[in-house]
Amino acid sequence: MKRPLAHRARPETFDDIVGQSHLVGADGVLRKMAEQSAHASVILYGPPGTGKTTIASVMADQFGLSAFTFNASTDTKAALKQIVEQATGYGALVVVDEIHRMKKDVQDYLLPHVEKGDVIMVGITTNNPYHSVNPAIRSRAHVFKLNPITEEALVSHLKRIKARFSEELTATIDDSVYAYIAKASHNDIRAAINRLELIESTHQGVRVGLEEAKKVLLAPTLDLDKDEDNYFNILSAYQKSIRGSDVDASLHYLARLLAMEDLDSILRRLSVIAYEDIGLANPSVFAKMHACAAAVERLGLPEARIPLAALTIDLALSPKSNSAVKAIDKALADVEAGKTPKIPNHLINVANFEDKDDYLYPHDYPDHHVVQQYLPDALKDAIYYEGVDTGKYEAALKGRHTAIRKTNHDKK
């Protein structure tokens, strides 16, 4: 029985890997590590289908190490112990899939072996490890982000695979079909190769145009003209319509997104909208967003359209505020500009040799507030948050913020 094309076409060297030149290109850090025999544990994170597992496999070959795989979500500590016992002594690379799910007892067993260099760990996750991976694991590995695969890179890769396996892939495929495969696969390499294989297996030796490909793949219809609406433009139009409080336009674009059946992308965008565009004007939507996500996960399509529609209407008609976004961006701009002066002594917990004023505990004072300096001296007059009055909740926050600033100013 022939193995799937996606398996047979998996890259064998760094040169074969798609779209991650910052890691495996001529000046890529992983390639340099292999060339210098600088073996080190790493964590690879990025969207599904971007080549994390493939890079881990190629790393093992390039490092000259045997490779073992451990799934942190389903495998047991006993299974890991067996792997480490086999690996210790001659060097091995252990691929830890779903590393963000690693249990503490498993982590405690693995980390000493990683520290001693008995094994090289390659953690794999779709989650941002700075938020999801235990710091004890993260501190013992270099963290590298994989980029989403561009449509152009994926199309080029599909054409290389077709040329490499030309004896069995005998259909003549139009360029529009390659673009359609890339979009229908949401730029997931594995999914794209599987779709190419399906088209080839049903159209051996004949020409395949866009209409024929659509009949085979049965993927949602996507506009392939970059000058017209495409998938990401629809997501953008959806957010802008909600931001603009046009509930009917919001529902229209939601319907177009639902036709593509990509619930994850819709939920991600709704999460951004809730915090970026509604924000403190109506913070109750944060809980509604999480409740909607849970309902969508339980229901699936077609019923998931109902909670999504309800939340879309709620967000579109809600008061809006982007004050939180503006506030953190102003603070980040200062930090990125190097404005990170010394923390005031009275806020530092550890003892030092400088004179320290006593820290005043706010809960010991009326209204749980006491005037004291929190910002460093060089930034003591900085103002990042500017409240707005578009919702009752933030209007109250703005009023309290103004009153606190006035009190602090009057008592200086």
Image (tube, rainbow, N blue to C red):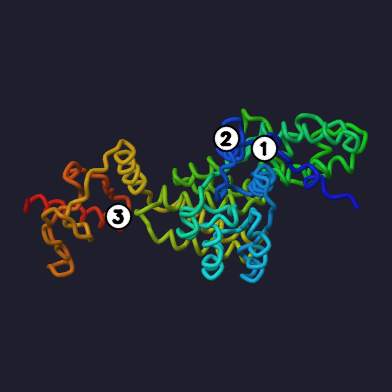
- The mark tally for this picture is 3
Residue 259 point in image, percent of width and height: 67, 49
Local packing at callout 2 (Cα closer than 10 Å; few below 14, some 14-19, many 20+) is some
Local packing at callout 3 (Cα closer than 10 Å; few below 14, some 14-19, many 20+) is many
Instruction: Report the residue marked by disc 3.
Output: 394
| Residue at the extreme right of the image, as rendered | 205
Instruction: Report the residue marked by disc 2.
Output: 28
| Residue at the extreme left of the image, as rendered | 411
Residue 394 point in image, percent of width and height: 30, 55
- Disc nearest the viewer among 2 and 3: 2
- Residues at marks 2 and 3, CA–CA distance in whole angstroms: 47 Å
User: Is residue 10 toward the left or the right of residue 200 in the image?
Assistant: left
- Disc nearest the viewer among 3 and 1: 1
Residue at screen point 88% across, 34% down: 171
Residue 285 point in image, percent of width and height: 43, 59
Instruction: Report the residue marked by disc 1.
Output: 14
**Of residues 129 and 267, the one drawn nearer to the viewer in this rendering:** 129
**Of residues 298 and 108, the one drawn nearer to the viewer in this rendering:** 108
Residue type pointed to by label 1: Phe
Q: Is residue 409 visible?
A: yes
- Residues at marks 1 and 2, CA–CA distance in whole angstroms: 10 Å
